[in-house]
Amino acid sequence: MHERSDTHIGTRLRDVRKRRGLSQRELAAASGISLSLIRKLEQGEIRDTRLESAHRLARALRVPTSRLIQRDDVAVKPVAAPWRPLQEAIEHPAVQPEEEPSLAGALATLPALRAAYFANQLHDVSELLAPLLRDADALEGDTEARSLRAHILQIAGSVLTQARQFDAAETALTRALDASADRLRAASIMTTWTWLLVRQGRLEEARQMATRWADDMEPRVSRATPEDLAAWGWLLLQVSAASLRDNRKGEAEGAMRLARSVAVMTGHELPRGESRLATWGPVTVAYKKAERGIVLDRPDEVLKVADQLKETGQSTSTEFHRHRLDVARAHTMMRQYGEAVEVLSEVRTQAPEWLVEQRSARDVMGDVVEHRRTLTPDMRSLADAVGVAL
C-alpha cells in the first residue's frame, strides 16, 4: 500500500468514524477489528494496515475502502537485492548485451522462462529474466520481437508484483503495454496490472481500469473465440475483485455473475496460453468465488467451495495455490489452526519459493503463532519459512 506524507489511514479513519457518530469501541465491535489497532491507527503509531482490515473498517463505516486507504505521495522503497538486475534491465533498456542477440536465440530461451514461471521457481525466473530482457530490447522492432518483449515484460511485472516490488512492476507493465502488438496480449497485461493495483490498495484505480478494459474487450458472443472469452472473463474477475474490496458489493456481484456466464460459455478449463499467464474456465471462476468469502468474512463459504473443488484442483496452477491460501486463511478465521498449517504445508511442498513471497501466508502463520499456546515442529518450520518471528 502507498504511503502519504501528510495523511495516513488513521486520519481518514478518525474523520469518517466521527462523522458516523461512532466511538472507537463501537467501531471495533462493528468491524471485528481490535480496539487496540484502531487506537494505534488513529494516533499514527501505525501508519498502514492490511487491506483486509481496511476493508472491514470501511464496511462497518459504510464507505468505499479507497476512502480510507487512497494515498497520493508514494514513498519509493528500495528494490530487494535479488531483483535489482531485473530492475536495471527494465528501467535502462538502452544498455546493450555483450554479444549481438538473435530473435531465434531469445525465442529459444523463452520456454525455460515460462516453465520456471509457471512452476513458481522465482529464483530461476529472476536469473533468466534480466539477460533475456536485455536481448529482447536489443532486437529490431518488428512485430515478433515486440511481441516477445511484451511477453517477457509481462512476466517480469507479474513476478515483481508477487515479490512486492511494486514500482519496478508498474514500469515493466507500462513497457509491456507499449510493446504489445495485439489486443489479447494487451488485455492479459491489463489483467496483471489491475492485480498489481489491488495489491497496492489502489482499489478505485483498479476498478476503473478493469471496467474500462472489460467494456472494450466485450466480444460479440456469436463470433467469440475461447481466447476472446478468456480475456474478457479475466477482466470481469478483476472488476469483481477490486469492487468487492472497495466495498462496492453490487458491482462486484454483477461482474462475478457475468464472469461465471462467460466461463459457462467457454465450457471447460483452458490451459495457459501464449497471451494468458493463467488458466481460465469454470474452475478458475470457482476459486475466485471462494476468495469472496475471505473478503466478506464468511470462511464457511470458502471451505464449502473448497470441498466441492477437491477433485478439480490443478496442483501446478498459481490460481490453485492462491485458492489454497484462502482455504488456510478460512481455517484460521474459524480458529482451526492445525488445519490451516496442514494446508500451508501442502502449498509449501508444491511451491516453496512462491509461498515465501505471499503476505497472506505470513498473516495465516502470524495468527497461528498468536493464538496457539504451543507450536508443533511443523508450525515452527512454516513460521520460519514465511518470515514470522517466534
Image: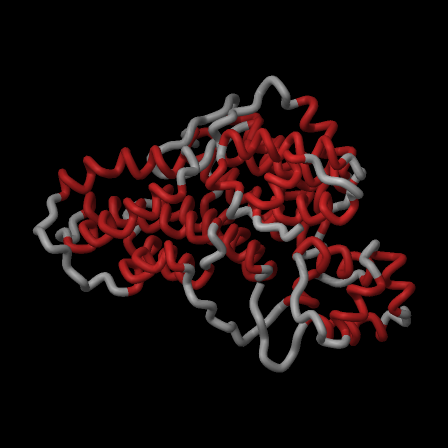
Q: Please name the residue shown 14% across and 51% down the image.
A: 139
Residue at the location (86% across, 70% down)?
20
- Name above or below for residue 87 compared with residue 385: below
* 334 left or right of 248 in image: right
Residue 239 is situated, as x and y percent measured from the top left of the image, at 58, 48
* Residue 262 makes an appearance in the image: no
Colour style of the rendered protein structure: secondary structure
Q: How many marks?
A: 0
**Left or right position of 144 against 120:** left
Residue at figure coordinates x 55%, y 61% from the top left: 205
Q: Could you tell me if residue 149 is visible in this image?
A: yes
Residue at 8 percent of width and 51 percent of height: 100
Q: Position of residue 3 (x, y in %)?
A: 58, 71
Q: Quadrant of the N terminus?
A: bottom right
Q: Residue furthest top?
A: 311
12 and 226: which one is in front?
12
Closer to us: 381 or 342? 381
Residue in the foreground of this view, choosing between 91 and 35: 35
Q: Position of residue 385 (x, y in %)?
A: 55, 43
Pinpoint residue 82: horizontal percent, then vertical percent: 37, 54
Task: Check the image and name the residue furthest to the left.
Answer: 100
Describe residue 340's horizontal placement relative to residue 354 as left or right.
right
Q: Is residue 22 left or right of residue 376?
A: right
